Image (cartoon, rainbow, N blue to C red):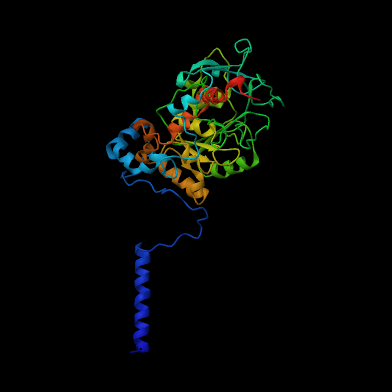
């Protein structure tokens, strides 16, 4: 039986008003037309805090978080990230697995010496005699006196020899820059990427152990963000300028400096001076200065998979919360809920609003530090396990498996 026109109109009007009621009451929600970047994480702040609290003392924030949330809830909330990075899998392809004891049988040499050749940024404090797993001893040195018959030569700024004869050291080439590229002459290639022969992340501490690691318990609340860059790349500068224009900040270094010079950090934070008798370099007090800020802006030179550099790890070491722009798979390298990934926000305005709100919520802010306080590392444990700190032993193992200088050419 067909409906009369009057009944049809009545039903249509009722459905329309029902739709409006549902929409404005929040049961229905359309995606914003301004959203251009899909967000993989919920940026809403926790509802545990009852009011805005522009805190300056980090200990008080920790205390509130402990009473309202705590480590047990944190482990439950971020259990997927704890299990294995961004994807929540048990293993991340972004990081190489450190070999088990079963690989010990593959070693053809039990003592390996590596001679670092040419000018290189590799720090002198990496030189050492290491006692590695599987009973392997590893000599890593820049001195040909200590390694007169090395098993491997390591090249970083210069290319290896074009030929290797039987009895010659193996040729190792390392490139940790964004556009990593094999020399074509090496026997072993080291880079930041897991698909190459030996991986070395930037998460270690040995290449910057001369710095002042004093961490301040007090956080600036009038100036929220620390930024420091002395290599003024156009694209990075533009991104930094756009974001920093939206938040109160201090910019050290050469690029976008707004504090009156590169050495202003020591006048602002005199406790960051290492030794009064030594004229400090600007990077000596980097971590200490960062620790006075709630956030550190970290922007990579190049945004490519797995290229996660010291810019991010410096901020984590300092006890600040990094605001990061860089590798799409960055969460595979960092502790659970430890960074703010700028690429996950629909706009810089949305990111700035989130940062300002977080700065006034001690409970939500303290949660970004919970990984360290609760001992919840997730994939970060693997990141540290394949860092520069462990490179000597891992490279010596690779050289040992090939047979060292006795390997066939």
Name, please, the residue furthest toward the left.
67
Name, please, the residue furthest toward the top.
145
Q: Quadrant of residue 302?
A: top right
Q: Is residue 148 left or right of residue 67?
A: right
Q: Quadrant of residue 254?
A: top right
User: Looking at the image, which is closer to me, 56 or 303?
Assistant: 303
Question: Residue at 51% across / 46% down in the picture?
Answer: 343
Asked if residue 337 is positioned above or below residue 207 in the image, the reply reads below
User: Looking at the image, which is closer to me, 285 or 317?
Assistant: 317
Which quadrant: the N terminus? bottom left
> Residue 202: x percent and y percent?
53, 30
Question: Residue at 50% across / 34% down in the picture?
Answer: 96
Q: Is residue 210 visible?
A: yes
Which quadrant: the C terminus? top right
Q: Is residue 207 visible?
A: no
Question: Residue at 45% across / 23% down in the picture?
Answer: 214
> Residue 150: x percent and y percent?
61, 16
> Residue 153: x percent and y percent?
63, 21
Q: How many marks?
A: 0
User: Looking at the image, which is closer to me, 16 or 88?
Assistant: 88
User: Looking at the image, which is closer to me, 226 or 87?
Assistant: 87
Q: Is residue 128 left or right of residue 366?
A: right
> Residue 221: x percent and y percent?
43, 36
Q: Is residue 157 left or right of residue 69?
A: right
Asked if residue 285 is positioned above or below residue 229 in the image, the reply reads above
């Amino acid at each position: 039986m067909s409906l009369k026109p009057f009944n049809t109109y009545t039903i249509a009007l009722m459905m329309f008003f029902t739709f409006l009621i549902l929409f404005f009451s929040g049961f229905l929600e359309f995606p914003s037309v301004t959203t251009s970047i899909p967000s993989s994480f919920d940026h809403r702040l926790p509802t545990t805090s009852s009011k805005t609290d522009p805190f300056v003392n980090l200990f008080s924030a920790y205390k509130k978080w402990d009473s309202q949330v705590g480590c047990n809830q944190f482990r439950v909330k971020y259990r997927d990230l704890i299990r294995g990075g961004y994807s929540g899998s048990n293993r991340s392809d972004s990081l190489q697995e450190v070999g088990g004891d079963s690989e010990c049988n593959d070693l053809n040499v039990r003592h390996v010496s590596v001679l670092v050749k040419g000018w290189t940024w590799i720090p002198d404090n990496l030189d050492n005699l290491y006692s590695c797993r599987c009973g392997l001893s590893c000599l890593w040195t820049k001195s040909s006196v200590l390694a007169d018959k090395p098993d491997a030569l390591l090249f970083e700024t210069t290319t290896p020899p074009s030929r290797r004869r039987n009895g010659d050291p193996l040729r190792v080439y390392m490139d940790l820059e964004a556009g990593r590229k094999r020399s074509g002459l090496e026997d072993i290639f080291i880079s930041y990427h897991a698909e190459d022969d030996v991986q070395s992340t930037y998460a270690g501490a040995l290449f910057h152990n001369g710095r002042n690691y004093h961490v301040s318990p007090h956080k600036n609340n009038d100036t929220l963000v620390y930024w420091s860059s002395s290599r003024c790349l156009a694209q990075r500068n533009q991104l930094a300028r756009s974001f920093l224009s939206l938040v109160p900040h201090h910019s050290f270094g050469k690029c976008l400096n707004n504090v009156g010079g590169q050495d202003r950090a020591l006048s602002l934070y005199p406790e960051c001076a290492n030794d009064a008798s030594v004229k400090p370099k600007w990077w000596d007090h980097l971590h200490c200065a960062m620790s006075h800020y709630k956030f550190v802006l970290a922007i990579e030179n190049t945004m490519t998979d797995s290229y996660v550099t010291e810019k991010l790890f410096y901020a984590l070491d300092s006890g600040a919360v990094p605001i990061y722009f860089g590798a799409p798979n960055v969460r595979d390298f960092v502790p659970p809920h430890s960074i703010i990934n700028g690429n996950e926000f629909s706009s810089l305005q949305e990111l700035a609003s989130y940062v300002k709100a977080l700065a006034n919520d001690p409970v939500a802010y303290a949660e970004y530090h919970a990984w360290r306080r609760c001992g919840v590392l997730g994939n970060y444990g693997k990141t540290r396990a394949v860092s520069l700190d462990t490179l000597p032993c891992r490279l010596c193992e690779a050289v040992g498996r090939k047979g060292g200088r006795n390997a066939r050419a």
